[in-house]
Image (spheres, rainbow, N blue to C red):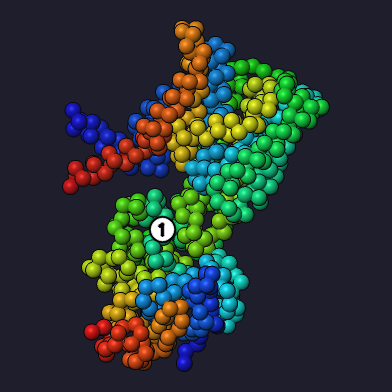
Amino acid sequence: MAEILMNTKDLSIHFGAHKAVDGVSINIEKGLFTTVLGPNGAGKTTIFNLISGLYKPTRGKVLFRGEDITKLSPIERINLGLARSFQLTNVFPTLTAYENIRLAVQAHSKIGCKLFMNFNRYIKINDKSKKILEEVLLYDKKDFIVATLSHGEQRKLELGMVLALEPEILLLDEPTAGMAIEEVPTMLDILKNTKEKGTTILLIEHKMDMVKQLSDKLIVIVNGKLLAQGDREEVANNPEVMKAYLGGGMTDGTPS
Amino acid sequence: MTGLFYNLIEMIIKRRKVYKNLSISIGGLIFFTTLLLFVTILPHVSGFSTKVLYSRIFILAVYGMSYDILRGYTGFINLGHAIFFGSGAYIVGIFLTHFGNNLTVLALAILTVLIYSSLAALIMGKIVFKGGGVIAAAMVTMALGEIVRNVAERWREVTMGADGLPFRVPDMFRDRIMIYYYAFLFLIIMTLALRQFILSPTGRVLLAIRENEQRAIFLGFDTKKYKMIALQVAGLSAGLAGAMFALLNRFANTDLLTVQQTLNALLMTLVGGTGTLYGAIVGSAFISLTQDTLLDLRAVHPIFDRWLLFFGSIYVLVVLFMPSGFVGLYNSKMAKLQVRLVQRKK
């Protein structure tokens, strides 16, 4: 078994009487691609919010490399190497694509609060920004205002921003949601390349074809509770999973 | 005809590429040379009131730009911004009245203005950036402004209260032509410094905070720290503008500390264009010149005794028809032209 990079213990958050996430304990192994599956409203995004520090849990712990990070702020968690994207595209809409990426590179470079030096003089940051724009296939659109880009391009841009942080673990919330069909494969390629570089990826998704291609591990969440976790085949063929989430009959990874 | 126009613009844009490092286009060069000539010759051919009017435009422009750093770049509405401006004026006045009228005292006064503004910004930031949103911040800063105004009004031994504080200035600031040039120099230096600030990595983070603070946090930026830096820069600039204003008017009163004074800065940036920096300069000129013209018109017809009525209407019209202000409108027109040129080439 590979080294566990991050795990949660009995993670729970209650909004009033509603138990959005209830006693979820999951393990994410280093270097692997783990997918969180579950129907709408199952609490997948809430788990992400708890892991990334946007919400404080009612009960339970988040551990990163075995250390308790439950009380750390989002910024401190990012400095540890934990980056996330959002379900709704979350970028800087009136800046150019290039500036969006450059801000992310700047955040990672730890150059501090430089006050009176023109940004164009930071050659390393500018070069790296261009490289990342090439990686996410947006270089020819670098001077476009982000609000004028298509939804798929904005998603790629956001992924580029998260990649610029060079995280140890990447939390991606439905990165292909709302994308045009023809854009999905390029997104998957980018994810594949990222995985091959050794980044641990935790992804929320409900598209089965995606899971089949890329995932090593599956985690299934239903009604805020953990239903199953483990290797892809093992979980996909788990009768309980088939019954609860897919309504039965999933042999080749696609619902029949 | 339009074709000719497009060719002209295309030429300018091409030239712009040649001079990219200087970021000067031919049109811009002509414009700025004319402006510079006008500004240089003006004090020698105009009367007392015009000189003072233009000096005031220059100084208030810096005050407006300092406000734009907060509202236009960081997205933080500060209704107590007059604290910095008014206190800067008062500190210079108090020093020159109580410690002697010479340049050493003035230098000490400026130093005090800087320290005071920095501390005031620190205290204001500590309270406001605790959270609570834009409206809460606006209310809290307004209350802070009122506190400072009240202190100035009640502390009669030092500030002369509501009567205002008249004072003498060192000799080098007595000549109206000289102070006009100082004010102009002050504007140029502050514009360059603030421009450099917003083009720096820190300035870019401020834009990110205005656009989407949550994303900025999730990139790992300590947004509170950056907002504090913005408040410091804005506070120091406004404090210096206040000090210059006092040297120009040789007078400080509680009007400089009122919410109205803060709103002046807000209106300057609104009319000129928020988040453009130069907008504040245009806004300052527009407001002061309109005000001056309307006041002059009182001699023409008694209805202009109610000049504020017209002044208000002009504001409403500007905000209604140019929501992005003069500079904002210019920028978007230029961007559209550029897009059309690219399409024409295809």
Q: Is residue B320 above or below residue A119?
A: above
Q: Is residue A37 left or right of residue B117?
A: left
Q: Is residue A185 left or right of residue A105?
A: left
Q: Position of residue B251 (x, y in %)?
A: 69, 22
Seen in the picture, residue A97 relative to B295 is either above or below; the reply is: below
Image coordinates of residue B306 in percent, x first then y, are 50, 16
In percent of the image, x 59 and y 31: which residue is there?
B261
Secondary structure beneath label 1: loop
In the image, residue A79 lies at what x, y percent?
A: 55, 68
User: Going 26% across and 44% down the picture, which residue do you hit?
Assistant: B339
Residue placed furthest toward the front:
A17
Residue underneath mark 1: A91
Residue depicted at 23% across the width and 84% down the height: A256
Classify residue A141 by image quadrant. bottom left
Question: Residue at 61% across / 22% down in the picture?
Answer: B179
Q: Nearer the viewer, residue B340 or B184?
A: B340
Question: In the picture provided, is A225 more to the left or to the right than B18?
Answer: right
Q: Quadrant of residue A186?
A: bottom left
Q: Amino acid at mark 1?
A: Val
